[in-house]
Amino acid sequence: MYRMDELRQRAAHKQSTADIPVFTHAITIDLDEKNSATLQDYGVKIVGAGSGNSITLEKDQRALDIQLEFAQASDCHVVLGRSKPISLRLTVQGKDNLICLAGVSDRQSHNRVTALIKGNRSLLHLGSDFTSVNSTLALFGEDRIMSFGPDCMLSWSIHMINYDQHTLFDMETGDVINDPTDMRIGRHVWIGQDALFTRGVSVGDGSIIGARALVASDIPPTSLAVGVPAKILRKGVSWTRAWMGHRPSIEETRTLLMGQIDGTGQVASGENLK
């Protein structure tokens, strides 16, 4: 399939935390004006097509709300696994960038993502069952990645950017000290309302980021982090989408994250998860 092998290779090379979508009947459509009517049938609107850009999605996918601003993009490709519902506003400036949404979950009535990619050969990779009430993602630089593992849940007004947008430099040497960086969010991570992430941080599998936290350093797996800047409040803790302590969901999540439970029936330390 068009560029899917390249997506797999780039995801592996950049150690993406997300999965690759599996298609039943995929179709690839060039993002140009002659295909605007076809794209609109899928719910995809082009605002500036650029050159050599394309999108791959399920042939029977409908009811999308996607706006692509690719006027300053070339040879970029969007891969969209089965997703419903989603409101995506994506602006790409640069060459040879890949954007993959493995599959936005219908567990939430609305999913809104605004994303900007500015640079070349970068990968924005959202894993399957991703949900977002309203998030803003920005990926700058050359050969960078921002990835979210499967089953991540983002609340209102999440902001994540891999660059400060203005240059910081050392006065003595003149060296730049804030180049764009990679950012990776593990699988099954819950990010609370108004959380803000600074450049270069990663979050381990199963963790929880509290509302209005400022995440300025890496958060290990199965940890609860809160505050400004975010500090670890508790380790060896995770979450489930189910309400009111639904035990089957809790056990399913424990098994998923740990793989095994020790002889006492307690979950082993989250520090050992990678």
Image (tube, rainbow, N blue to C red):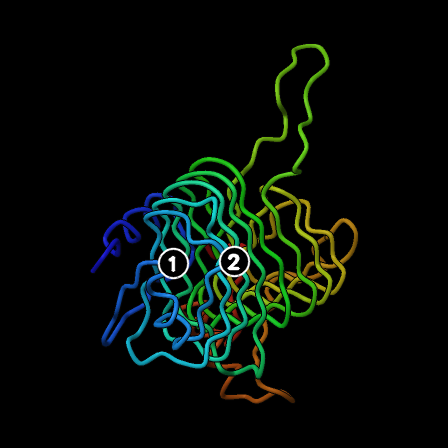
- Looking at the rendered image, the quarter that the N terminus falls into is bottom left
What amino acid is at disc 1?
A: Val
Which amino acid lies under the numbered mark 2 shown in the image of this protein?
Leu
Residue 222 higher or lower than 216, as above or below = below
The residue drawn where x is 63% and y is 25% is: 177
Which percent across, then down, holds residue 168? 69, 26
Question: Closer to the camera, 3 or 255?
Answer: 3
Q: Position of residue 232 (x, y in %)?
A: 69, 55
- Compared with residue 74, is residue 21 higher up or lower down, i.e. above or below? below
Query: Is 102 positioned to the left or the right of 114 in the image?
Result: left
**Residue at x-position 38% and y-position 58%:** 78
Relative depth, front residue between 89 and 48:
48
Badge 1 is on which residue? 78
Q: For mark 2, what is the residue?
A: 90
Nearest the eye: 42 or 9:
42
Residue 119 image position (x, y, % from top left): 48, 39
Which mark, by number, is residue 152? none
Q: Label 2's element?
A: strand
How many numbered circles does the render carry? 2
Give me the C-alpha separation between circle 1 and circle 2: 10 Å
